[in-house]
Image: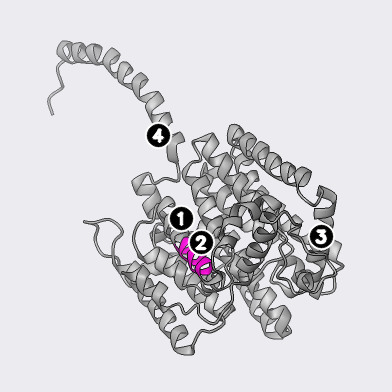
Amino acid sequence: MAVAAVVGALDLRGVTPQDLGAFLHGGSRLLAGADPYSPVASPLFRSGHAFVYPVVAGWVLAPLSLLDRAVADGVFAAVSVVAILASCALFGHRRPLEPALILAASATVIALQMGTLNALLLLGLAVAWAGRDRAWMAGLAVAAVIVAKLFLLPALAWLVLTRRWRAAGVALIATALALGAGFALGPLSLHQYSSMLSVLSRREAAEGWSLTGLAVNLGLPSTAAQGVAVVAGVGLLGAAAWQQRRHTDERIVFAAAVVAALLVTPILWSSYLVLLAAPLLLLSRRPVPLAVGCVVSWILVIPDQVSTALVLAGLAVAAVVVVAAAVVPVASGSPPRPLTSLVPRGRRPSTPELLVATGAVVALALASPVVRSQLACVLAVLAAGAWALDLWPRPAWSTGGAARQGWRATGGAARQGSQATGGASRQGSRATGGASRQGSQATPAAPG
């Protein structure tokens, strides 16, 4: 009911799904045997609404172009909502609060309004995580999200850093086959497609919210700006690998891979922030981080065709959810938690943290409007990365569920290990049991 209420509150009318329109245009041209790509000098390409995806992705959504436009828009929006619901379930959240908060975030509203692939990408990441112990499932899911959006290549790094070699091999081969077939049989070669993406990046990076765009607007050349973004993404993955070896928690690497993808991509729009739901769902068993993310999303950007009353109502709902998440226990029979459980106890912010927070506030206050939006988005992504790396202690409501319930974070590997050692432990207990009982009979217990 909560999810239905949120979806019903989203007024998607009056906004043309431009991203979906690019797919429909490209799909219709593919079905007609024509070139789905527009010349880089054409008005359609300059407008930012041309089909620029790998040709394989165009073929997947080509059947939608056979439908009436209004029907196609409705079908794609419904599929996107279902994808978000399924993603929450695959990450282990089956209550209605979590999908309701994701759907209520402004980034999700924009993603639905624009008809983007981000909800489907979130589902692909969820499938990869849920099937991580099945090499074919994880590998094909990772390949699918990479083929759809090339900037998600760090998802492959997750498989490599966690030594899931078979899944990484499946992902690499499937990605190479899909992209290779498209370049070999499609209208553009690899070199031509790369050149088109380079032109697109130079044209749109400065207008988007990426770290590359921020560096460009701060005066760096485009090549140096992209280098800064790559260094940030690689550094985050390296830190995640180090943390994973210390804590044996694979969730850290997976979450860092998603955040690294958002740091590395030269083009980042507000709707891409939907993908941050993956680390938030994975690293917390309670909806509080999602509620905070929902509020932050509305501070960062306001969707089109959304009234002020709806914004205030959404913020009020998020506040109620935060309070409810602090008080209502996750498992039945658990005692209620006080409101103070929202704040980690026994710890004050360190001096470096205070300096970083103060510097961020000053930078946001002094920045120009364009740079301010980019800086705020980059700071939000970096905060998600720092939280994924566990650079500050997570509250009890964040990590307790995974630790107490043996949650899916340890997954099949831990369960298989327990099964592998269980038999030996039981045989050892049988072997020593008789000797222990004989010893107890031979030497009675000493009086108290």
CB under 8 Å between discs 4 and 1 = no
Check whether the beta carbons of the residues at disc 2 and disc 4 lie within 8 A of each other.
Answer: no
Disc 3 marks a residue whose amino acid type is Met
Residue 87 numbered mark, or none: 1
Is 134 on the left-hand or right-hand side of 65? left
Q: Nearer the viewer, mark 2 or mark 4?
A: 2
- Which sits earlier in the primary sequence, circle 2 or circle 1? 1
Amino acid at the residue labelled 1: Ser
Residue positioned 31% across, 59% down in the render: 330
**Distance of label 1 from label 3 (alpha carbons):** 32 Å
* Residues shaded magenta: 71-81
Name the quadrant containing residue 204: bottom right
Q: Is residue 397 magenta?
A: no
Labels 2, 3: front one: 3
Q: Quadrant of the C terminus?
A: top left
Q: Residues within 10 Å of mark 2 (few under 14, many from 20)?
A: many
What residue is shown at x 33% (from left), y 17% (from top)? 428
State whether residue 220 is above or below residue 428: below
Q: Sequence order check: which comes first, mark 4 or mark 3?
A: 3
Does residue 392 sit above or below 302 in this rendering? Answer: above
Residue 196: give its label: 3
- The circle on residue 277 is 2
Q: Magenta span: helix, strand or loop, mainly?
A: helix
Is residue 78 shown above or below 389? below
